[in-house]
Image (cartoon, coloured by chain):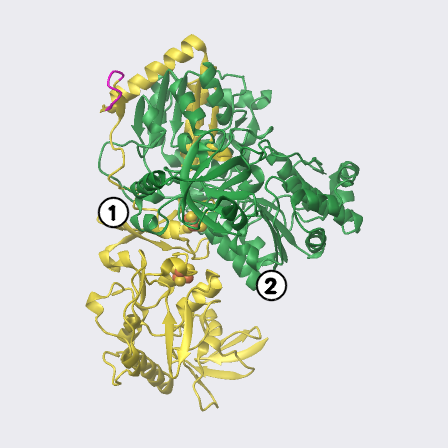
Chain colours: A green, B yellow
Amino acid sequence: MTNTIQDITQDANLILLIGSNPEEAHPVFGMQIRQAVQRGAHLLVADPRDIDLSQKADIHLKLKPGTNVAFVNGMMHIIIEEGLQNQEFIDERTENYEELKKLTASYTAERTAEICGIDPQQLREAARLYATAGNSAILYCLGVTEHTSGTEGVMSLANLAMLCGMIGRPGTGVNPIRGQNNVQGACDMGADPDKFPGYQKITDPKVFEKFEKAWGTKLNPNPGTKATQCFHKMMTGDIKGLFIFGEDPVRTDPDTNHVIHALQSLDFFVIDELFMTETAKYADVILPGRSYAEKEGTFTNTERRVQRVRKAVEIEGNTMADTDIFTEIMNRMGYPQPKLTPAQIMDEIASVTPSFAGISHERLDSEEVDGRGLQWPCTGKDHPGTRIMHVGKFARGKGLFQPAEYRASCELPDDEYPLVMMTGRILYHYNACAMTDKTEGINEIAPEAFIELNTADAEKYGIADGEMIGISSRRSEISARARVSDKTRPGETWMPFHYLKAGANWLTSAALDSISATPEYKVCAIKVRKLSPEETEAAEASARATLA
Amino acid sequence: MIHVTIDGMQMEVQEGTTILQAARGAGINIPTLCDLEGINDVGSCRVCVVEVEGREKLPTACNTPVEEGMVVQTMSERAVDARKMALNLLLSNHHRGCFSCPSNGACELQDLCYQYGVEESSFAGARKQIETPPVEGHPFLSYHPELCIHCERCVSTCAKATGREAITFRKTGMFGIINAPFGEDYKDTLCESCGNCAQNCPTGAITEKRKKKYRSWEVSRVLTTCPHCAVGCQMYLLVKDGKIVDVEAADGPSNHKLLCVKGRSASFDFVDSPRRIRTPLVKNKETGEFEEATWDEALDLVAEKFTDIRDSLGGDALAGFACSRSTNEDIYMLQKMVRTAFQSNNTDNCARV
Ligand code: SF4
Ligand code: SF4
């Protein structure tokens, strides 16, 4: 995020929430958004579904799934048409404005409203409110990125913020709420095919040389392949050996069948895991690592805030610290890696990563930091960290408008698969539940998968609320309980992806965003049907067994 | 600026400051029970009463703003007597089965009564006539009306901090009733099971049920970061005999003493779960079954196979993915292993998933 949770929820006059359901996916952030609304902040929600916060919103724009780019272009069209843009900011701090103006010219309120399935008047009001509220902050999440046009969605939001000068101040900014606890950190730490830690490009000869020197070895100069595309390379035999550290792609990646085939095509597959996950079952070797409560370290939250993780317990058995596992393998493969403590590893990170140069465990534990973590960029021992990005100047100098056209999603509904399915998270579980489903009370509260169906569709297919139904896409069929309501629009459905039985990712599409290779989880075409009495019984039994 | 004198100390404070804030700012402690800064200032418990020169009535410090020239005594005889009386009254409606209460030793009412020497109540406790049974249908949370002092901290916490308004307070005649959403029908309420109300309850009236399994003085607290989502809430793991038994919210920069149900109730059972894998496993190619191995056997096998692939086909035939749930230090070392030992840049994380 460019800003912090605190300044967004305390200093913003308006929050534009798009493709994000923080009350369930980031609950404590959601609680603070509710506090902001209680204090009188305006709230705009752009989401295909009724979420709880949409009831508290000034305006809920119930967009057709996959139309974010059109929506944002429409907002900008109206803002420019009504002269509400921040011309001073545009002139002083940005470039390429004319292109943006040209591109958004065709996104009139009427045309945009038509594409997005919303009311043009509401769109106008939303645009005016955003531009004139004073401090407006944009918050977005996977509802923007998990589309084939995800990257364009993000660029469009940045365009909107720059157009109105809503950046570089408390209560503004373009703020992706990162999903998992340390996704931010995983990207920062160079778990990326073409970037070393701190987003240093491997194609930059100076950077490459620096890492060869720091690590004392020759490195491979070929940029790597993104994980989602690696699965394809496993099937073609280009990748023969795989090491997975704590992920469960069989459960969390789209098109489960495709992932399983890929894993089965490998010569050798090793996983470092806590549990016998669906993915671990395909491994040749399982190495038992340790959980967050058994180690020292740091996580980086969505505010770029590096915070400490501390060891609380040791468990019985023959597990090994994950960093020691990697060190052992490095040594046994001929790379001499001394065994380091987590604090020493952070010192090494700081020594090769300019944006982390001032971060150490010692400092994080100090009175100076006082339990508030350090937000990168933190470029030296006496650098206080960076609360808000792009103050006065963009990281790259001038902010570049990158106008993007709206493109329809890859898999649209048709006669055979007439419904759109979106996927998402619910409050009580996390991803594949490897952690949450070990808590009995959680399973009692949220025991099984469901699919949200619009009332009109339910009527059409003769489906009652609470009935077990069959759901299929071009890839597979599953069954789950129908929840009939008007939360989604007619023709649209929604399903959580956490559950093993009735895992939504058996159905989802492996189409990837053209730039970031993010799967298009949010939109795939499905059909539903009533189950025969025998099938219903089997589905009920299977739902009951999920917890066993 | 406003000039006040508290316990003989002269001070200058902003207009609108309460007596309590002014006193605390000067390091003077006024006891409170129902007060929760920024959340609850109903002034119902009357434990924070103080004497103000020239005033007949003793005002509650938590919600009385200072006035120019005010002279306040926090420990005058009248104030202390009134405080004891307030505790005496609170105790009349509070069952004193402290031994069997999960909050024993961590109860603000108990602490204050001890401090002020109030052991018994001299009143009958009028509320007992209308007392309702405990509410215990929720898997994590319960409400015991007989321990409740009606301070309304839970009501305000849920309404103003959690922002949920799942707990209501309703007046029936001279009595109030706290409606806690932890009955058998909890799924039909607005409650999100976050437990923020329980953490703020000064007695044992609203508690996480697991609190019964330990006493507050038996646990050590380890400050850490929640392992679930990217809000990065700060929390304490409560450890008893080498096992994590509970979680408490800490005052972190992104969570301000709040947690959600995942952080508070689903972040520790998995740690020592019987389903953890606790020894290296190698798949027997013939049977397809996993068999236990020593670390040396497993690591040698891994190194040998990956070295073979690297040396025969080149590093690009290997890949290693990191977990976006693990620590920065883990992830850094994983990608370092892939780049140096595997000789590959096929490393990525589940950020796109
Ligand atoms: S658990 Fe959370 S949502 Fe439920 S009543 Fe308490 S504060 Fe409110
Ligand atoms: S307590 Fe809840 S909101 Fe906070 S980090 Fe954990 S999962 Fe996220």
Q: Name the amino acid type tagged 1.
A: Lys
Residue at 23 percent across and 56 percent down: it is B213
Q: Is residue B308 magenta?
A: no
Q: Does any portion of residue B212 appear in the rendered image?
A: yes
Residue A74 position by quadrant = top right
What residue is pinned by disc 2?
A40
Q: Name the amino acid type tagged 2.
A: Gly
| Side of A388 where B213 appears, left or right | left
| Side of A339 where B229 appears, left or right | right
- Helix, strand, or loop for circle 1? strand
> Where is residue A458 shown, x and y percent of the image?
50, 47
Magenta segment boundaries in residue numbering: B285-290
Question: Mark 1 — on which chain does it sit?
Answer: B
> Where is residue B322 shown, x and y percent of the image?
43, 30
Q: Is residue B286 magenta?
A: yes
| Side of A435 where B289 appears, left or right | left
Residue at 45 percent across and 78 percent down: it is B61
- Main secondary structure type of the part rendered in magenta: loop
The N terminus of chain A, quarter of image:
top right
Q: Quadrant of ligand 1?
A: bottom left
Closer-to-camera residue (A489/B181): A489
The 10 Å Cα crowd at callout 1, few under 14, some 14 to 19, many 20 or more, is some
Question: Mark 2 — on which chain does it sit?
Answer: A
Find the residue positioned furthest to the top. Answer: B312
Q: CA distance from mark 1 to mark 2?
A: 44 Å
Residue A146 position by quadrant = top right
> Where is residue A134 shown, x and y percent of the image?
69, 57
A472 lies above or below A173: above
A502 lies above or below A462: above
What residue is pinned by disc 1?
B243
